Amino acid sequence: MANPFRDMSVVMQVLVAVAIAVILVLAGVYLPFSPVARERDAVDKAVLDRTQLTQEVTQLQVYQQRYGELKQQMDALSKQLDTLKTIVPDEKDTDEFIRLLQGAASASNVQLRRLTSQAIVAKEYHFEMPFEVQADGPYFNMLDFFERLSRLSRIINVGDLTFADPDAAKSSKYPLRPGTTVAAVFTATTFFTKPADQGAAPKGAKPAGAVAGKP
């Protein structure tokens, strides 16, 4: 039986062989279930996954860069909060409040004679804890005392300030140091934020008429 392929010229045989090869290649590439098509789909999927992962990594790098900034901001806010807790503490810390008053008075050579606790006043965001204070000393020492109160770490407001007649002060029940020219009565108010029983006297407060210092 004659073989048409063998009857063709060499050139035609080469062309037919090339055409068959091209058809086989195209069939392998474009047929859905061919190995080449499966590999191509796998490569396309890998490229797509890589692109998506690259985008996600880029986004995460932005967050990584911002993390340092956010951490610095959080540290700064934490320090501010600690400072605010010193200025306006959560608790009443009455003992610490009295210690601050006594320390300022001692540094100014002023005598604290009496600290009388007053009723705690509730405000919208904080509580006021007032004390009536009686003190005496030389005039400029008293000025220095009030100046020191304004520089304390905890906020202490001074109000309702009245000065007694020096002659009347010398006749008081407290022995006065030499050089004492001013006797003052004022309200020293500090603040705290944690809710508390407003009807109870602050813990550690001096009762009415209690003497905070000695001559």
Image: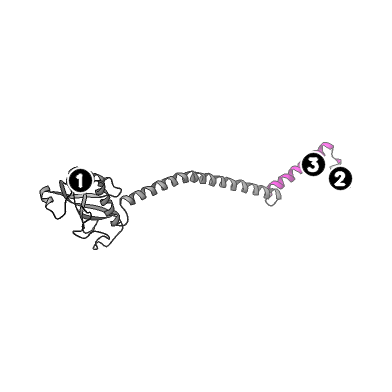
Q: Is residue 27 magenta?
A: yes
At label 1, counting other C-alpha atoms closer than 10 Å, the crowd grade (few under 14, some 14-19, many 20 or more) is: many
Q: Furthest residue to the front?
A: 178
Task: Give the residue at x 31% y 50%.
Answer: 87
Q: Secondary structure at mark 3?
A: helix
Q: Secondary structure at mark 2?
A: loop
Dominant secondary structure (helix, strand or loop) of the stretch shown in magenta: helix
Mark 1 and mark 3 lie on one chain; the one further toward the N terminus is 3
Residue 64 in view, yes or no: yes
- The residue carrying mark 2 is 3
Residue range (magenta): 7-32
- The residue carrying mark 1 is 142
Q: Which mark is residue 49?
A: none
Q: Amino acid at mark 2?
A: Asn
Q: Nearest to the eye among marks 1 and 2: give it.
A: 1
Q: Furthest residue to the top?
A: 11
Mark 1–mark 3 distance (CA, rounded to whole Å): 115 Å
Q: Secondary structure at mark 1?
A: helix
Query: Is the Cβ of the residue at disc 1 closer than 8 Å to that at disc 3?
Result: no
Residue 125 in view, yes or no: no
Q: Is residue 20 magenta?
A: yes
Task: Give the residue at x 70% y 48%.
Answer: 36
Q: Amino acid at mark 1?
A: Met
- The residue carrying mark 3 is 17
Q: Nearest to the eye among marks 2 and 3: give it.
A: 3
Mark 1–mark 2 distance (CA, rounded to whole Å): 129 Å
Q: Amino acid at mark 3?
A: Ala
Q: Position of residue 164 (x, y in %)?
A: 13, 49
